[in-house]
Amino acid sequence: MENLVLLLTLLFIFLIISYLICDRDMMSPDVLYLAGFILAMIAASMNISAWGIDLSIKTMMIILIGTLSFVGTGVMYRIAHGRNLFHGTVEIQHIQIARWKNIFVIAFGIVTILLYYKEVVRLSAYADSYWKSFGVMVAYKQVISYGNVALNPVVNQMTKVVYSFGYIYMYIFLNNIFASQEKKRIIKNVEYLLPAFLFIAMSIIKGNRVDIMQLVVMSVFLYYMFLHRKVGWNKHISGKMLKKAFLIFAIGMLMFYYMKELVGRVSSLNFLEYITQYIGGSIQLLDQYIKEPSKSNAIPLGETLTGLITGFKKLGLTTATLRKQLEFRYTPTGVYLGNVYTALRRYYNDAGWIGVVLFPAILSFIMNAFYRKVRSYKSNNIKHIYKTVIYASLLYVVPFQAIEDTFYISKVTIGYLIEMFIIYICSLFVFKKIKIR
């Protein structure tokens, strides 16, 4: 328990220092990285007795070194590139999209959702009768996660288009909210919010709540960005906005919990047990892995670059066989925690201490450089909107490092290159001959 408290205290100190170094920018990658680990540590500390937590010195050092690598890289990047960032205000112009494009986007989303649900029903038929008894979604999740059947590739690509439109239209909606002073500006721009609702519906049918959390993180960042463009980046966030952020987080956690049956999850845990296990279970599992390591992957970087290696295999460039899931574990007290070990487990397993330093540093460099570029944009041209949407949709990978790696596994892949291309094509479709008033 002492080690857990010490580590949490050190992370809080790092957070305060990082917040001040980053000019009190709450959405800077360094602050978000630390916030993610602090939240995970708090969730874990609420289950010390239930899980039998006894954090080892080695686990502490892995988390501290990984954190210092990420934050230290961010600090060095800012020192190398100076502090002369634009802090003034920017006039936010209203974006008007042709009505027929909005209708097309909504219709395409509805058709894709119906086709995907048809695939869900088809694939659920391959599940054992035991899983079928829990319903279509549970059977589908079991088959898609552990079976050898695949989704229709055309429908799969169509979902990426639905997601792309969801990202783009969320940008438009929030841009227009800040571009207007009208009291009914939300109602007048509600049509731009519909693709985001289709995004959420698509995520539920896919059984993927992480995608919804990704959209929430993106929305919070865009709100924060447009707010600062309007009032200036030298204006700091008030306590009132912090309360709103905590309220959004609380509502999000409630939705996450009560949505579990909809996305095919079966659990008898109560709300607090379920949420703290999801957020903080990774800390305990990392410690158990350090104390009782599993066999190293025979494929170099096989845990960290799983998505890239799998893509190469589909193209016939390798015959490497990767295990589909990390090992599942129970706590010393017999509580089932699953198989999510923080991102650091994969880095340490594949490359030892070098991986714990190198992989967080690379991610930090990419996100800090990208954030600096996005902050400097002052216009709504297609290129700037596209890059802002990419960054905003990618940002969730930073706080999620405390739970699981979603950058090297999901983004350093051939599939993500295709996804970025689709977002670009969708951006051209939406914004070509844009009418700004």
Image (tube, rainbow, N blue to C red):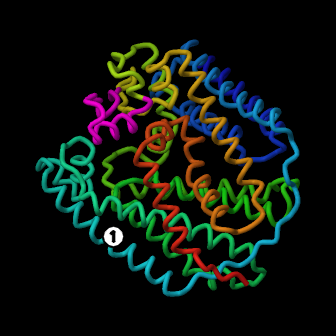
Mark 1 Cα shell of 10 Å, populated few (<14), some (14-19), many (≥20): many
Q: Magenta stretch containing residue 325, yes or no? A: yes
- Given residues 291 and 394, the one toward you in this image is 394
201 left or right, relative to 355: left
Furthest toward the left, the residue is 129
What residue range appears in magenta?
Answer: 304-329
x, y percentage for residue 252?
54, 56
Residue 231 visible in this rendered orientation of the protein: yes
**In this rendering, is residue 195 above or below 31?**
below
Quadrant location, the C terminus: bottom right
The residue carrying mark 1 is 112
**Helix, strand or loop at mark 1:** helix
Q: Magenta stretch containing residue 344, yes or no? A: no
**In this rendering, is residue 372 above or below 346?**
below
Q: Give the residue type that dot 1 points to.
A: Thr
371 left or right, relative to 339: right
**In this rendering, is residue 275 above or below 52?**
below
x, y percentage for residue 360?
60, 30
Which residue is found at the position 39% from the left and 15% from the top? 293
